[in-house]
């Protein structure tokens, strides 16, 4: 095997991110990366950079829908200006209860995953659309699905089993988790010295936290869907079910149907809650920090709710692991928001977590714990594309 260009696709609600890696002869070298942003808005952007960060494509096209957006990516990769992929890896949040292994994509597999859209309603429709388009626009090239839930498959039943009647458990309702590719990438980067007792906090617009023992997931905060767990940008996180029932009954008073009421509740819980709902301002931590400096009390409450919740989860995971060797922050907030890291760790000295304020005053990869901290605290950016490439190469070999 000499040259093996692998295309990685990661689709979002209004964007398609992609990267091409050289994966032949054991290499893992990024050749190009790009994105189509602003799909469905008047602010469309399409760019591609080389490995040195030089922009090779920089356009502002009309992007009325996903079809137009993905066609731009396919046309560019077919143009001859970039290495044509010999395999494609797709990130997928959840394949439901019947698709738990990373594997080659077929039309039948896409249909199977689509039948469990409710398990990741904001992500699955876009992901399955891109998979179908990739099979059509790159005929004959093997496509593989790489699941966020794959890393979490080692969780014990006491963690995954929900306290619900058995007929719903039989439908696949249980804890699946998300951000698994990010967590797997942190474990990968820590090799060969992976701490026995590790907690990783993936903090971004979507936020979650995982307890990892001997490199394997023991527990994670997100549940059936990414809405559960920690409060995040627009999601409630874990919440008293009675709150959702109360809101549902209020919505049902004017909703046209039960289905319409459920859709409205989903919008409230997944798109209007979290940091945005509490602050009534923004789901972006940068905006909230600016508002706090200006004396905005609601922004202060939203951020306090975020950091307090994460500190509680860390404490519970220390108990579950029976101690802690290392805490890792990752994700956009975890990597870049110095104040959030400090606020989360401020009350955790009794657990052996002590930050060094000078070391913590950085963005990006760093060791931020104090010299006398029993627990090592690090910031490590995720390497999700690299993990997807690794799985694609493994599956091609299989």
Image (tube, helix red, strand yellow):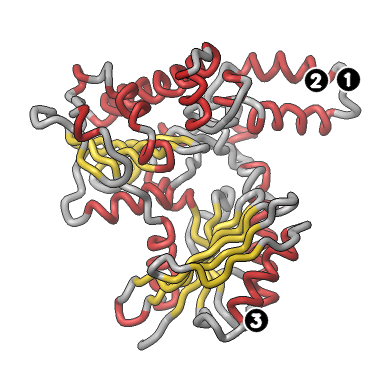
- Left or right of 202? Residue 251 is right
Ranked by sequence position, the earlier of labels 3 and 1 is 3
Residue drawn at (72%, 59%) of the image = 66
Residue drawn at (57%, 31%) of the image = 283
Give the Cα distance between marks 2 and 1.
6 Å
Helix, strand or loop at mark 2: helix
- Where is mark 1, residue-wise? 254
Residue 18 versus residue 55: which sits nearer the camera?
55
| Label drawn at residue 251 | 2
User: Which quarter of the rendering shows the N terminus?
Assistant: bottom left
| Label drawn at residue 139 | 3
Residue drawn at (44%, 71%) of the image = 50
Give the Cα distance between marks 3 and 1.
48 Å
At label 2, counting other C-alpha atoms closer than 10 Å, the crowd grade (few under 14, some 14-19, many 20 or more) is some
Q: Look at the numbered discs 2 and 1 and tell me whether their residues touch, using CB distance below 8 Å.
A: yes
- Left or right of 377? Residue 271 is right
Residue 3 versus residue 180: which sits nearer the camera?
3
Residue 107, placed above or below residue 96: below
Residue 143 pos. (x, y %): 56, 72
- Left or right of 125? Residue 394 is left
Q: Is residue 323 visible?
A: no
At label 3, counting other C-alpha atoms closer than 10 Å, the crowd grade (few under 14, some 14-19, many 20 or more) is few
Query: How many marks do you count on the picture?
Result: 3
Q: Look at the numbered discs 2 and 3 and tell me whether their residues touch, using CB distance below 8 Å.
A: no
Residue drawn at (16%, 51%) of the image = 193
Helix, strand or loop at mark 3: loop
Give the Cα distance between marks 2 and 3.
46 Å
């Amino acid at each position: 095997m000499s040259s093996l260009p692998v295309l990685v696709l990661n689709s979002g609600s209004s964007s398609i991110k992609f990267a091409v890696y050289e994966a032949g002869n054991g290499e893992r070298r990024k050749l190009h990366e790009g994105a189509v942003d602003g799909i469905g808005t008047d602010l469309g952007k399409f760019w591609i950079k080389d490995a040195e960060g030089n922009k090779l494509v920089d356009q502002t096209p009309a992007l009325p829908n996903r079809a137009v957006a993905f066609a731009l990516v396919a046309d560019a990769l077919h143009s001859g200006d970039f290495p044509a992929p010999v395999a494609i890896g797709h990130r997928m949040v959840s394949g439901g209860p019947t698709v738990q292994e990373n594997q080659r994509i077929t039309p039948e597999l896409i249909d199977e995953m689509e039948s469990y859209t409710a398990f990741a309603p904001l992500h699955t429709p876009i992901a399955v659309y891109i998979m179908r388009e990739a099979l059509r626009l790159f005929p004959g090239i093997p496509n593989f699905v790489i699941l966020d839930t794959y890393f979490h498959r080692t969780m014990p039943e006491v963690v995954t089993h929900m306290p619900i009647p058995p007929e719903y458990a039989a439908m696949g309702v249980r804890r699946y988790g998300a951000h698994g590719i990010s967590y797997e990438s942190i474990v990968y980067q820590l090799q060969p010295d992976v701490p026995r007792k590790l907690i990783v906090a993936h903090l971004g617009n979507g936020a979650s936290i995982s307890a990892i023992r001997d490199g394997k997931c023991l527990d994670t905060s997100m549940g059936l869907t990414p809405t559960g767990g920690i409060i995040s940008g627009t999601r409630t996180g874990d919440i008293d079910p009675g709150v959702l029932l109360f809101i549902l009954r209020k919505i049902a008073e004017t909703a046209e149907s039960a289905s319409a009421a459920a859709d409205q509740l989903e919008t409230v819980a997944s798109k209007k809650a979290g940091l945005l709902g509490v602050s009534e301002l923004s789901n972006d931590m940068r905006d909230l920090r600016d508002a706090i400096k200006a004396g905005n009390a609601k922004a202060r409450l939203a951020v306090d709710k975020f950091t307090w919740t994460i500190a509680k989860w860390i404490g519970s995971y220390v108990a579950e692991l029976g101690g802690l060797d290392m805490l890792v922050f990752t994700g956009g907030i975890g990597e870049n928001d110095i104040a959030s890291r400090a606020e989360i760790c401020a009350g955790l000295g009794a657990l052996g977590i002590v930050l060094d304020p000078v070391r913590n005053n950085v963005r990006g990869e760093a060791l931020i714990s104090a010299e006398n901290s029993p627990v090592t605290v690090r910031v490590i950016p995720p390497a999700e594309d690299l993990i997807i490439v690794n799985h694609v190469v493994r599956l091609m070999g299989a």
